[in-house]
Image (cartoon, coloured by chain):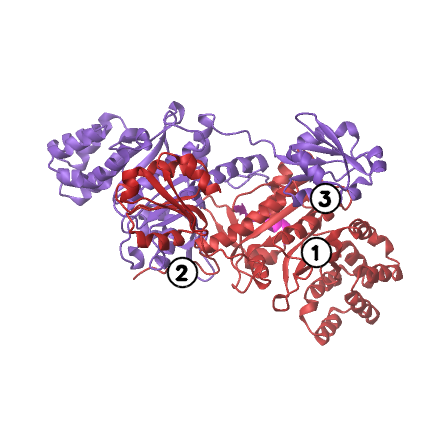
Chain colours: A red, B purple
Amino acid sequence: MALSKKPYKGTRDFLPPDKRAQDYLFEKMHQSAQLFGFEHYDGPLLEEVELYKAKSGEELINDQIYSFVDRGKRFVAIRPEMTPTLARMVSRVHREIPKPIRWYSIPNLFRYEKPQRGRLREHWQFNCDIFGAPGRTGEVEIIQLLISFLENFGANESHFEVLINDRTIVDSIFSSLTPDKETIYKLYKLVDKSKKIPDEVLLKELKEIGLEEESQKGFKRYLELSSFEDLFKFLQELNLGEAAENFKDFYQVIEGQNIIKYLNYDPTIVRGLDYYTGIVFEVFDKHPDNRRAISGGGAYANLLQIFNEPALAGVGFGLGDVTLQDFLQSHNLMPDCSKAINDIFISYQVPEGYRDLTQVASALRSAGKKTVFSLETLKFKKVFSQAEKSGANFVLLYGDQEKNDKCVIIKNLASKEQETIELSNTEEIIKFLNK
Amino acid sequence: MALSKKPYKGTRDFLPPDKRAQDYLFEKMHQSAQLFGFEHYDGPLLEEVELYKAKSGEELINDQIYSFVDRGKRFVAIRPEMTPTLARMVSRVHREIPKPIRWYSIPNLFRYEKPQRGRLREHWQFNCDIFGAPGRTGEVEIIQLLISFLENFGANESHFEVLINDRTIVDSIFSSLTPDKETIYKLYKLVDKSKKIPDEVLLKELKEIGLEEESQKGFKRYLELSSFEDLFKFLQELNLGEAAENFKDFYQVIEGQNIIKYLNYDPTIVRGLDYYTGIVFEVFDKHPDNRRAISGGGAYANLLQIFNEPALAGVGFGLGDVTLQDFLQSHNLMPDCSKAINDIFISYQVPEGYRDLTQVASALRSAGKKTVFSLETLKFKKVFSQAEKSGANFVLLYGDQEKNDKCVIIKNLASKEQETIELSNTEEIIKFLNK
């Protein structure tokens, strides 16, 4: 029986047009991160499961992780996220390197889940993190970078918004509603899904949690907050003004900046049961057909503790390639990647061309020209369709006449301009290509 | 107990200096492949084990592969090599796309083996392949590309050589020594290790194989061949001239080319029990401390058969990042990657700088300048050591005087040249950076 030609469930084959599209995303990631002085890092694809257990909930370990026991009896996992690896690496070197540490990476990650739109088993994620930045400057820079990255694709405030909240504030509000830790934990879970369930269900679940009636009202009022001003007023009423200090600092810095137009306060953003301890945020697609998060992140204080290292404030975001591409496509911001782009297609109409043109090809490549060399003699009438398929901007022709005259014809495929140039005069050929 | 900070056995953490070094290798891979008109592709990290079983020997499946059963009862593996994935992908599309197909990839691969110099459990491999090229033109182009890639690092014929052979020839010689397929198989294994074992052992093993005395001599004579001329003479003696047709074609094409200086005939190059059917080759480091293969490849005819597709001639090579870096380091061809390179470090000596300079930073980034923004007020005497650490070529200063005058000082750290420019005149600032 013949083997299947399909890729493994939930993964993708990247044929050249697909890979060009992905490389387009990756290049913008490198570019944007480097414009902010972030340095590229990477870690191993496999890590011991212990690492994820220490950082994440058991839920992730049991259900969503690709794990197995290796022959050395190590219990290992294919990385489902980059942050634990990052924490491990930073804990190795943070004492010796200058702060703030600005690092980025574009790892492929695996999650064991039912493939669906925007969520695959293998995807790539753009990760940017800052460690050891004073005050709220790290949070500001990370959000600046994230916005600038999306703007580099031509996206603007009509395409996306950044929804933001602060876990310190949420903690203090929930603590004012109930003294019970377990109940607070349940409220977090409820906030997380509150947008997706109808009001009756929310109320029913609130009752089940066992929150007092007054506190239920408080929780519902919290969920209705819709601006920074609302929030700050609400906190004053509850005598929780102090909890807002960090968030106010942050707000004051960004108030005068261009990025403020993207930011909206949203009480439902809490980033689940994750390791965040301060400001948290999500980038939301504004397209009505694609209303969902394309990136999320936040500030965390205790990521290095599992390695017995002192607390080092950090903040970062992750952004997946699948959701990003969906976002860009929804808004017509993806370029056409279906065809390769090359500088020149070298053809010959006499078999001697295969030998005679080797030096020209080699010289063009040395000059940085992407050169597709025909591997067979091509009839004149076939040359142009082949050149077009190769994605070349220029074509070189070499027939009987040219062979006798020891020259070549170079033609610009767009302008149709052409020139006959001596075969040995590669400088002139390159000059014509640069015109 | 604190968690280990070490990466998983046989894998590497890429801290920014390590990653810069690897990215330097990767960039040359992209560049070189694209100069030859090769298109980038990629496939999934996981494939079903069936795929590797169909293509490779059982040995690989049992001992060296990372495999496990997923929750859907699929028996999957972390890819140990790229060729089976490539074959699967080409078999999906080869009917619809123009020939020759020129594809390259830089996947990470996993092999379960004892980590040692040059061999790790996770490594990256530069893979280039051509399908559907007429005659020996694919072989020639693949070897041209491989040599040109190494030359792009500054390597030349004093650093490496390309050892070459042809499986068709080896097959016909071995068939002339014995009619028994099993014995031929054993001879292949013996050739493969012949360089690593002393003569007595070789003789002993030859006897154990059960080869007749006359054939033993023939085998030993074969192993002593050391040039193309030798080989062609030897074949004539054995009346096997026909088997050399392909190889002669190949040799005639490259004879007039620059790359001939790198090529040497070597009878011990057979590429093991792999799927090659024609010309095979290995790039060997000439450094006495590092005598080993840094790349290998060859021509194969039947790679698509496992998918019930018609034969499509292909040729390709693989080259690992670890061996490549060892090679370059042995010959002092690796640049210093220890420090980041940035355009400008923005510092301020008054706290207002954090706000006042945001627009300048943003404008510089829009102009493509890698801009490291200080996240704290820096005393003048600390500025230069910080700027130096950031890898910047320029530094911006903003103190009391500048704040009052609404201007900034920009200083070239190498030439010490400096200029005072209006804060709002970002054009002038960029001009100074471009000088």
- Residue A132 visible in the current orientation: no
Q: Is residue A7 above or below residue B138?
A: below
Please identify the dominant SS of the magenta region. Answer: helix
| Side of B175 where A334 appears, left or right | right
Front residue of A319 and B111: A319
- Residue A20 visible in the current orientation: yes
Instruction: Return the disc, 1 or 3, that comes first in the chain's sequence.
Output: 1
* Mark 2, secondary structure of its residue: loop
Q: Position of residue A102 (x, y in %)?
A: 66, 41
- Residue count near mark 3 (Cα–Cα under 10 Å), binned few <14, some 14–19, many ≥20: many
Q: Where is residue A381 in the image (x, y as percent from the top left)?
A: 31, 54
At label 2, the amino acid type is Lys
At label 1, the amino acid type is Phe
Q: How far apart are marks 1 and 3 (CA)?
A: 17 Å
In the picture of the structure, the residue carrying the numbered disc 1 is A281
Q: Does the magenta stretch include residue B184?
A: no
Front residue of A289 and B249: B249
Q: Which residue corresponds to the image point at 74% horizontal and 45% vertical from the top-left?
A: B359
Q: Do labels 2 and 1 share a chain?
A: yes
The boundaries of the magenta stretch are A46-56
Q: In which quarter of the image is the N terminus of chain A?
A: bottom left
In the picture of the structure, the residue carrying the numbered disc 2 is A6
